């Protein structure tokens, strides 16, 4: 007896790793993807929106609506990451001119209206970038918070420390005020920080397995990785790039591949050197409320087996 697909909304700043996460979701019948909302992050909003349209076309799913959202953080100037993702945000493969465009409706309005139009507990937010859209929706419509089933996010770092500053992970650093709003909203929250994503490295063998799928998706994922990995390999001397964002989708598909702890996580907003740091009370030294399932480990082989098998299902 197949269970009813989980209704999800993917909020994203594509970004090669976002693209792989979106492909994984669209390849998995366990999900009904109600929409893809884009936010400024890895590259500016016009590009993240264009890229989301390209990725849904790559997956053969032009039916999944894309909604452009916020083009700047709540209270700070936008910081982007072309040094990692390239000028377009999807550097690596040869892309085409998008045949589809985002909807006219703003992403924040889509988020609010969609949650209000469904029964409480029906919708899961999967966030892959800065949390500006989500925070704006929560500020504009606080009534939606108790109606959201779960929020699974890629973001933060503790033992792994920062990747954009010595203390902060990129998604949180870009909009720390938004992250603070989301963590305080009381939504059941799972965080996939660098502590776990840095254990999901696309080694040569794993990327060759994508390439060997023989479909356009596999070739595009391999070529995106060929480009995306150079930054992390150079910086960390690792034998592959961490595939950050697909861990969000994989956790929903196969939580048994992951492990973590329910702990308190706060966002540093006023640090001279530590703004955007996720202060994770991993050892329980405070009595602050446990507001997140903070994931620390993954069965990397199992994760890549799942991802590769699902990507094989796409065109
Ligand atoms: O720090 C990694 C995160 O920042 C990923 O979501 C990547 O796509 C970038 O947005
Ligand atoms: Ca991202």
Image: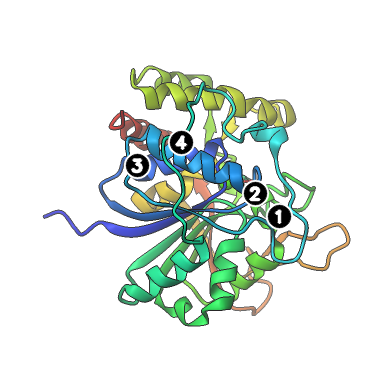
Within 10 Å of disc 3 (Cα), the crowding (few <14, some 14-19, many 20+) is: some
Circle 2 SS class? loop
* Residue at image coords 42%, 35%: 99
| Residue at image coords 33%, 17% | 214
**Dot 2, crowdedness within 10 Å: few (<14), some or many (≥20)?**
many
- Residues under labels 3 and 1: Cα distance? 29 Å
Nearest to N terminus: mark 4 or mark 3: 4
Q: Earlier in the sequence, mark 4 or mark 2?
A: 2
Q: Quadrant of residue 15?
A: top right
Q: Nearer the viewer, residue 239 or 221?
A: 221
Q: Which mark is residue 174?
A: 1
Secondary structure of the residue carrying numbered label 4: helix
Q: Which badge, 2 or 1, is on the more N-terminal residue?
A: 2
Q: Identify the residue shown where x is 74% and y is 31%.
A: 235
The residue to which callout 3 is attached is: 62
Q: Which residue is mark 2?
A: 41
Residue 47 image position (x, y, % from top left) = 59, 41
Residue 175 relative to residue 226: left or right: right
Marks 2 and 1: CB-CB under 8 Å?
yes
The colour style of the image is: rainbow
Quarter of the figure that contains the N terminus: bottom left
Q: Nearer the viewer, mark 2 or mark 3?
A: 3
Q: Quick one: label 3 or label 1, which is nearer the N terminus?
A: 3
Disc 2 from disc 1: Cα separation: 7 Å
Q: CA distance from mark 4 to mark 3?
A: 9 Å
């Amino acid at each position: 007896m197949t269970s009813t697909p989980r209704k999800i909304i993917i909020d994203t700043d594509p970004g090669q790793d976002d693209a792989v996460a979106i492909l994984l979701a669209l390849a998995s019948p366990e999900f009904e993807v109600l929409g893809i909302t884009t936010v400024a992050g890895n590259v500016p909003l016009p590009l993240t929106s264009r890229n989301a349209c390209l990725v849904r076309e790559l997956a053969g799913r032009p039916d999944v609506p894309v909604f452009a959202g916020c083009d700047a953080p709540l209270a700070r100037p936008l910081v982007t990451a072309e040094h990692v993702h390239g000028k377009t945000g999807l550097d690596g493969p040869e892309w085409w001119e998008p045949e589809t465009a985002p909807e006219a409706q703003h992403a924040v309005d889509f988020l609010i209206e969609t949650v209000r139009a469904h029964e409480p507990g029906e919708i899961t937010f999967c966030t892959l970038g800065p949390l500006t859209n989500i925070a704006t929706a929560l500020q504009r419509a606080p009534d939606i918070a108790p109606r959201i089933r779960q929020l699974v996010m890629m973001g933060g770092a503790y033992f792994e420390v920062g990747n954009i500053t010595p203390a902060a992970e990129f998604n949180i650093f870009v909009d720390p005020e938004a992250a603070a709003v989301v963590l305080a909203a009381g939504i059941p929250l799972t965080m996939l920080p660098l502590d776990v994503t840095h254990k999901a490295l696309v080694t040569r063998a794993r990327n060759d397995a994508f390439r060997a799928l023989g479909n356009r998706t596999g070739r595009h994922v391999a070529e995106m990785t060929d480009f995306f990995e150079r930054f992390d390999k150079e910086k960390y001397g690792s034998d592959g790039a961490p595939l950050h964002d697909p861990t969000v989708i994989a956790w929903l598909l196969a939580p048994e591949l992951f492990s973590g702890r329910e702990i308190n996580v706060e966002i540093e907003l006023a640090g001279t050197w530590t703004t955007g740091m996720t202060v994770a009370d991993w050892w329980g030294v405070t009595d602050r409320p446990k507001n997140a399932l903070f994931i620390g480990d993954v069965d990397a082989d199992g994760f890549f087996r799942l991802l590769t098998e699902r990507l094989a299902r796409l065109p």
